[in-house]
Amino acid sequence: MAKQPEHDAAGGGGAQFFTNEGGSYRRSADTGMGAGSVPRPAMPPMQTAAPRPAAPPPPPKPPAAAKPMDMTSPKDVSKALAETVVGAFVDRMKSEAGAKGGRLTIRDIDAMQEEFNRQTQALRGMFEKSFEVYVKARERAVWDQQRNYPFDRLLVKKFSHLFRDGEKLGPDDISRRILPGFFVAIGMMLGPDVVEEYQEKIRRVVERVKSGGKSVFNWDDVYKDNEAKAVSLDAEIAIAGHFKDFQKRADWFINLINGHLTPPDPGTPAAAAGWELNEAGLRKFLNALMTDLRAALDTDNGKLQITKRYGADTCADLFDILTQIKQ
């Protein structure tokens, strides 16, 4: 008679049976698959995986590229020069202090004065160039001084009616404070040699108008002169060509203008004192500046003259540019 199943405590609760084989009994384990099922093969002992070596730390991120400095902006130039001078001063003092056990004396600082003087000499050229550009632009921005720069006056006349100030100056309006930046931008887009060529041409127009027999000189007579109109149109075409990629050039122009705004007058309302050119104001300004070009493209004769002088492709590009500006 077969023995009743017994539970082996070491077997984790699995049932065990004894079967009669040749007059002796052999223990077999119930695999849970029913009587007569094939026993499960023995599982190989589990092997403990060798610990993985720690992953190396990620390489440090390279420092972000420094934003290119606009050397025509007084704000950027002043900031860069100040940081250069102070940075060089601090670095030199740290180096000297490290070599002397962390302490500096008055004599040590005096000894470094000569080196600082050499660095100052190296920066003088940059100072002088930056301030010369800015001072000249400020001088040209004064309406009374524009008699010395008649080409500037010819251009400003096209958009001066847009100027607002005080409480009348809204965020999308134009302030006279843009003029220094405008003259810097004109010099960069046309080139100083071309600007001077245009100045000289308009000076000759002014002299011709003055000697024309009228008792009183009137700038309106200069603006109406055919040679002055031709110079103005050439300048407008050249300026418009820079706005073929409108958004890129608009961002550049706005930043340049806002970097050269003249300080607000004392007593200016806070909103007007904090005014800066925005894209809506820029479009308004450019539409006024390019009045002659738009008028020429609106007539068959004007389109023909532009095509003869600049080519059909340029004429077509100008249509597209003015359309972008007007949007």
Image (cartoon, grey):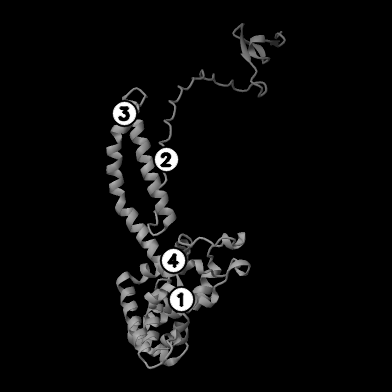
Q: Secondary structure at mark 2?
A: loop
Q: Are marks 1 and 3 in contact (CB under 8 Å)?
A: no
Amino acid beneath label 2: Lys
Quadrant (top left/top right/bottom left/bottom right) for the C terminus: bottom right
Q: Nearer the viewer, mark 2 or mark 1?
A: 1
Closer to the N terminus: mark 4 or mark 2? 2
Closer to the N terminus: mark 3 or mark 2? 2
Q: Position of residue 217 (x, y in %)?
A: 42, 86
Q: CA distance from mark 1 to mark 3?
A: 58 Å
Amino acid beneath label 1: Val
Local crowd at mark 4 within 10 Å, few (<14), some, or many (≥20)? many
Local crowd at mark 1 within 10 Å, few (<14), some, or many (≥20)? many
**One can see residue 67 in this view:** no
Closer to the N terminus: mark 4 or mark 1? 1
Amino acid beneath label 4: Pro
Query: Which of the pair 45/112 is nearer the observer?
Result: 112
Residue placed furthest toward the front: 215
Local crowd at mark 3 within 10 Å, few (<14), some, or many (≥20)? few
Q: Position of residue 269 (x, y in %)?
A: 62, 61
Q: Are marks 4 and 1 in contact (CB under 8 Å)?
A: no
Q: Nearer the viewer, mark 3 or mark 2?
A: 3
Return the residue at label 2: 61
Q: CA distance from mark 4 to mark 2?
A: 41 Å
Query: Which of the pair 327/236 is nearer the observer?
Result: 236
Query: Which of the pair 249/79 is nearer the observer?
Result: 79
Return the residue at label 4: 180
Amino acid beneath label 3: Arg
Q: CA distance from mark 3 to mark 2?
A: 41 Å
Marks counted in the figure total 4
